[in-house]
Amino acid sequence: MSEQLYCGWGRTDITPKVPVSLAGYFNIRMWEKVLDRLEARAIVFKQGDKYAGIVNLDLISSAQILVDRVWKKIADLTMFSKENLIFCSTHTHTGPEIRSTVLSGSEECAEDIAGAISQALRNALKDLQAVDSMVQGETYDNRFIFNRRYWMKSGGVVTNPGKFNSDILRSEGTVDAEIPMFGVKRNGKLALLFANIVNHSDTIGGNNVSADWPGFARRMIESQMPEGFMFVPVIGTAGNINHFDVASDLNQTCYAEAERIGSGIAATILNAINTLKPCCEMPLETRFTELYCPAHEVSDEEYNEALATVEKYKDEPDVSKADELTSEDLARKVPKVLKYFAQQVLLLRDEPKNANFPLPVILLNGVAVVGVPGEPFVEIGLEIRKRIFNDYRTLVAGHGPTGHPKLGGGYMPNIWNYNRGGYETTGRSNPFCTQASEMLLEAMKKLAKRS
């Protein structure tokens, strides 16, 4: 029989207090008011002398520049290292931009958030209590998820081509509508629940702070459970997935849309709680590797094309903080956006950033939590869940750190997505080499086989 398992959790507020831009678009968006609060959630497991932890943030990513600050603040917590602590984020596009210290307010905000994360971990350690049992299961909801890359009748793939675009032929890829879950029972009650949901958290837009639909889901679920209960929305590999239904005239960029999706997912998860089954008894184990990933390869052809684009649109003003730009503007080939993307390609060629992905895995009672960097495409998460860690109830935690302080994230397409179109494969949005997804999957196979 395994030693007694202990689990504790803590949460802290990471809503910005200083003037800072919100993250997730091409322009600076200084926040104006708070629609709902942002959280840092820390969960710690202890069994014998082994520890493992998960930090789940209402941010666009667990940027390395932020994680490095956290490590400095928890240097005294020697039970933690990058080998047993998973950082992941809900990917809200209405949280503070802390991936760069160049922007006004971002450094102070990042320091505040790092301090809050440190406190959440300390609260979790103080909260450690004996676990009665663990439960696991899965539910399903395909109402809000769409592969956002489309083959067009005119040829090639376009990301977010717009609603009712008559040139749309079909989606390029699949979705992942399954929602793996696991929970912890303390004092005879379900007290903690994780759910792995594969979708983008980008439903609101504008300049107001919000945790987006994962925040609505969390608040609704926790309101229906006993006091002290924590719900942890683990966002999976949704690099090519979002909530836009191109065949619907519904307004899908507003606060009401975040509530619609979050409430719908919450209802699905609440309805499935009674179907959760006991986990098998397996000891706590952590596995870890680091994966060196070269920077995006900018060919001479791509570089020269970018130079030509910048020259062609040299009279176009540069993107400014006043602009409201989205991927749909790129799909429409707005000159200012074309110029912006071309400028980013030139920077990538001149200043390549090689990543060193930290890849932590937590195994416990037949459940696996796998941390991955950035925004891999959905097929990569399915491969990890369904084939590589298929012996476990597996949750893939996306938007983890990249191992490079100047890389706050980035898309990770499948190798076959390249040279088709869509902005996720461009140098502006994808700083990683073409083989990054294949390298990631090979590293995961080795982690899964380790005895």
Image (cartoon, grey):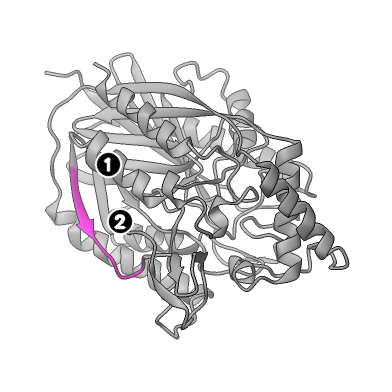
Residue under numbered circle 1 = 385
The amino acid type found where label 1 is placed reads: Arg
Asked whether residue 30 appears in the rendered view, the answer is no
Query: In the displayed structure, does residue 134 sit left or right of residue 150?
Result: left
Q: Which mark is residue 398?
A: none
Query: In the displayed structure, does residue 336 sit left or right of residue 291?
Result: right
Residue 77 position in % (x across, y down)? 51, 20
Locate the C terminus and report the quarter of the image it occupies.
top left
In-front residue for pair 85/450:
450
Name, please, the residue furthest toward the bottom. Answer: 249
Q: Are marks 1 and 2 in contact (CB under 8 Å)?
A: yes
Q: Which residues are magenta?
A: 136-145
Looking at marks 1 and 2 on the same chain, the residue that comes earlier in the sequence is marked by 2
Residue under numbered circle 2 = 176
- Dividing the picture into quadrants, the one containing residue 110 is top right
Mark 2: give few (<14), some (14-19) or many (20+) Cα within 10 Å. Answer: many
Residue 140 position in % (x across, y down)? 23, 60
- Asked which secondary structure carries label 2, the reply is loop
Q: CA distance from mark 1 to mark 2?
A: 11 Å
- Asked which secondary structure carries label 1, the reply is helix
Residue visible at 69% across and 34% down in the picture: 352
Asked whether residue 292 appears in the rendered view, the answer is yes
The amino acid type found where label 2 is placed reads: Asp
In-front residue for pair 222/345:
345
In-front residue for pair 190/196:
196
Locate the N terminus and report the quarter of the image it occupies.
top left
Mark 1: give few (<14), some (14-19) or many (20+) Cα within 10 Å. Answer: many
- Dividing the picture into quadrants, the one containing residue 225 is bottom left
